[in-house]
Image (spheres, rainbow, N blue to C red):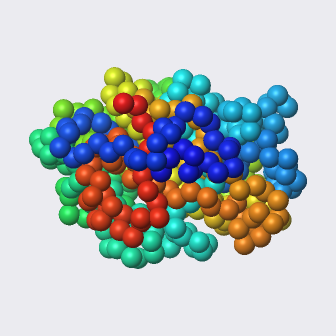
Amino acid sequence: MSASDFSRRGVLAAGLAATAAPRFAFASVPTDKRLVIVLLRGAMDGLSAVPAFGDRDYQAARNGIGTPPPGAGADAALDLNGFFGLSPALRGLHGRYARGELVVLHAIASPYRDRSHFDGQNLLENGSATPFGLADGWANRSLAALPEATRSGRKDLGIAIAPSMPLMMRGAAPVTSWSPSVLPAPSADLVARIRSMYEAGDPALARALVAAAEANGAAGPSARGDDAFAALMGAAARFMTSPDGPCLAMVESTGWDTHANQLGAFGVLSRNLAALDRGIDALAAGLGDRWRDTAVLVVTEFGRTVAMNGTRGTDHGTAGAAFLVGGAVKGGRVIADWPGLKPGDLHAGRDLKPTADLRSVMKAALVEHMGADPGLIERVVFPDSRAAPVLSGLFRG
């Protein structure tokens, strides 16, 4: 798909290739590239993550949860191109945009048009056009389409950083999974009782307990708290930098179903976006020099309603936003065939209308970044997806 095909209304940063013919990297070409897929389970609100503050209908359509335009205070959007911005919780990604490492995609969705998390995630993970259309995952199937030089010498081609193997990673290709073994934090009451017992019978143990508690508090949030996602992304980096480590990783992030109190400094969406931001930084730091050959695709099952609901949140919607970030990404651009936010422009009268298909970006990540066989990607990995051609020009040469 060419840039002109993808931007009929012109809200597209300049710089994509002007040719309509996709540039394929065929499977005979070896590659040492890395791909990380981040699945945000619960449906991220794309209009808060990437506010279209330049749309004159944005604030009215969001009726109380619209992000202020750049320059309007601490909660204002971080400007990208004068029309779109990023949530103020995404300062790290904003810096990567400025450095040419981030492509933002908006008004984008999978082929799913209903509002079930379960079905929407299943379709997004199986790679077909229907929920439960296939029994394995597109990421696993894609591994057989990678160049032989990429696949040889690796015990596991992919890894899922998740408590159990997600559908996206299930299939015939050799993959593994990993999840931290973390016990729940002891309650303050339990710690106080133990301390009282130690003080009565063993002052030395009591002093050690107090010292350990103070040290843990000084260290800040643990992997059980706000930095849990960063810890998972750091683990993905460690696996992918080992000599025979996987070339593809999937990392799950949960809790994006923001029906109530989603915004504000302590809102669930603001916290989630800040955690995502720190997670990308942790992955980049852990990968070191390999970051320049890495792409991270951040997707969610669907977007959320344009208007706020009665509990200062949003309900299940259709189109939203996605991120493509990494040293291998030809970034500093927003790609959006923007449909507008007037009532008559909305999908089903309530949602951002989808004008792009997530599969076009997924195909590009596999074919143009990872060097996968385009024929296998079209026939096996994403069957029945001819309406979603590869979106070219997203990666550095």
Q: Which residue is pictured at 41% across the width and 76% down the height? A: 132
| Callout count | 0
Question: Quadrant where the C terminus lies?
Answer: top left
Task: Residue 231: name its quadrant.
Answer: top left
Residue 206 shows in the view = no
Q: 22 or 43, which lies in front? A: 22
Residue 28, x across and y down, in percent = 17, 43
Q: Which residue is pictured at 82% across the width and 28% down the height? A: 71
Q: 215 or 182, which lies in front? A: 182
Residue 302, x across and y down, in percent = 58, 62
Q: Determine whether, in the image, residue 167 is placed left or right of residue 253.
A: left
Q: Is residue 27 above or below residue 133?
A: above
Q: Is residue 176 above or below residue 130?
A: above
Q: Determine whether, in the image, residue 236 is placed left or right of residue 372.
A: right
Residue 108 shows in the view = yes
Task: Residue 192: name its quadrant.
Answer: top right
Q: 49 or 21, which lies in front? A: 21
Residue 285, x across and y down, in percent = 42, 26
Which residue lies most toward the left here? 153
Q: Which residue is pictured at 55% across the width and 33% down the height? A: 15
Residue 36, x across and y down, in percent = 39, 44
Q: Determine whether, in the image, residue 248 is placed left or right of residue 232.
A: left
Q: Which residue is pictured at 34% across the width and 23% down the height? A: 289
